[in-house]
Image (spheres, rainbow, N blue to C red):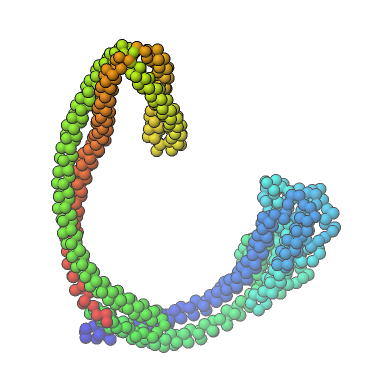
Amino acid sequence: MAKDKKLKVRYGLKEKIITLVALAVILSSTIVSAIAYSRSSTILEESAVVSMDDSMNIIETQISNLLDSTYNIAKMSLASGYLAKDMDEAAEQALYKYFAEWTENYPEIINMIYSRPDTIYIYPLNPAMREQVPGNSSWFNERAAEESDYNWLQPYIDAATNQWCITLYHKVKVDGQFIGFIEIDVSLAHIEEMIQSITLGETGYLMISDFDGIVGIHQNKDLLNKDIPDEELRQFVSNNTEGTLSYQSVNERKFVVLDTLDTAIQWKMVGIVPEEEVKSQSKALLGKIMTVTIGIVIICIIAAILIASRITKEINRFMLHLEAMGAGDLKGQLDIHSKDEIGVMGHILNKMTEQLGSLIGGGKKHSSDMLDHFTELSRMSASCLEATSEIAVTIDHVAEGAQVQSTEVESMVTNFGELSDSMQEISDSIAEIGQQFVVTQEVQKESLKIVDQLMETTKETSRTNEEVKNAIYDIDHSSSEIDMIVKTITEIAEQTNLLSLNASIEAARAGEMGRGFVVVAEEVRKLADETARFTDEIKVIIDKMKSQTKQAVKQVEDAKSVMGEQVETAKKTRDSFTNLEGAIHSLEQKVERIGTANKEMIAVRQNMDAITASLAEKAEENMAATEQMNAVTEEQLAIFSQVNTMITELSTYAKELNNEMNVFITD
């Protein structure tokens, strides 16, 4: 490090800067002085040209701005909607008001005109112009025939204001159809004043000419609208668009700069300066250059010494600060007070050191936090791995339970099949018993016939005849009661049929959800129809019984005299058969109840078949789901194992990063 400091003192930047600046200033000053002395006239001519060009550019810029503003006003007028195809009085007044606003805001505007083939609208108002019919004028038709939508009239002196002005005319179209022109007359008075106010050097001036050498603007009012008096100058202006000329006028030689305006106005600007004025300036310039050169050399050397000293001092501070940073010390700040680039660099370095210290300090904190987080993540990952393993064991137990459940459901299905066979056997037995009842009823009927025959032989017993008659009356009364019950059943069947019809209608309104109710309602309706049909048949039988009962009463009355002797025997026999009929009827009802219960059990068995089938299907689905969950759990176990390995590796990296961050001093 000491050796490096000695090298800096011996070959320091300070000495190099002073030597370089001194040599550069002396050499450049000598060269500039020599060139200035030999080419002072040329330099001043070029300076004059530049000065004239600057003045001409100012004029050209002003004219261009004026023309652009005029064109923009025309475009905005076209878009305003005031230039209508059909103009009534209200539209005309609105147009004048619109024109008045523009003329108030832009004093350069002399007139704003909306000319149509049939009339002219002009502001400020000019009654004489309103009487013109532009469509009858050649100028209107020639403008309308032009391909361009707009054009400029070259500068002219306005008769009313006696000022130079220029006119823009733009076609007005509605739906692509030409209806007239918007014309704007703009004064060039302020341009003329500006040109006349410009002086080139001490006695030089600007003038304006057209392409034919006719004077447009000049300090001498007597030359306006006349040819340039100097023939050589007029020829030069007429035949060229730009350039310089040195010519002999009547009294002296003059230096001329020519330029053409790059605008819609076809004007040429001519700057004229006496050559003697240029040469006198060249001589004075040479003396000034020599004096200034010597002063500059002295000042530059002194300034170089001061600047070099300041620069090297600041650079040494930079080096010391950078050495400290290289050693890991990021808490120090570079003390820089200069406002130049070195000062800016110092502030940038301080800011960078501060941000780097903050970044590394934050990195140290984040690396420590990251290490803690990775430790916590490792613990959580191990817990997740353990929990997932327990879930896998639980899923295995669930799978075993699902297997047992499937086996039990299959056994249940087998038992229900056996139960179904037993129920079918019971149904067959009940059918056989029903057949036996039919046979028994036939026998009972035959016995009743025998009793009836016996009763025919006991017609002499009146008491028996009375009992038979009373029994027949009882049967007739029972038939009437049965008839009333049949009527009630008929009304219930009709009401049931009506309810089933309403249920069908409501189910149809329910759509797909009510389709099952439609089937049920249809079955109920059929049952009601069958009930009505059976009650009608019962009613016919009851009516027939009533008729037969009446006939039997009559026969009993007729046979009363011959039934006396056998009345007791017939009574006992009939009572026996009556008791037998009751027992048979009671037994038949019980058998019917058993058949009904068996049918209900068969229906329940059918439902249980569907339920057990669904249980079997669900058991199979549970088996498949548990197998899938088992596979997913195993996959999660593998993933958690990989995550745990990665977290362990990241923890190692975080420890290494934390150790590397602790090398830097930030606090």
**Horizontal and vertical percent position of residue 83:** 72, 54
* Screen quadrant of the C terminus: bottom left
In the rendered view, tell whether residue 77 sits above or below residue 559.
below
Vertical placement of 578 versus 138: above or below? Answer: above
The answer to whether residue 544 is seen in the rendering is: no
Left or right of residue 153, residue 554 in this image: left
Relative to 275, 365 lies left or right: left
Where is residue 430, by image quadrant?
top left
Residue located at (16% from left, 46% from top): 401
Image side of residue 500 versus residue 183, left or right: left
Placement of 428 over or under 654, stated as above or below: above
Q: Position of residue 463 (x, y in %)?
A: 34, 19
Relative image position of residue 185 (x, y in whole percent): 74, 61
The quarter of the displayed image where residue 101 is located: bottom right
Q: Quadrant of residue 8?
A: bottom left
Q: Residue at x 25, y 85 (%)?
A: 5
Q: Is residue 568 visible?
A: yes
Q: x and y percent of residue 190 in the render?
A: 71, 70
Name the residue: 33% across, 18% down. 464
Counting labels gives 0
Looking at the figure, which quarter contains the N terminus?
Answer: bottom left
The front one of 446 and 300 is 446
Could you say which is closer to the camera, residue 225 or residue 473? 473
Please tell me which residue lies in front, 561 or 233. Answer: 561
Q: Residue at x 71, y 64 (%)?
A: 102
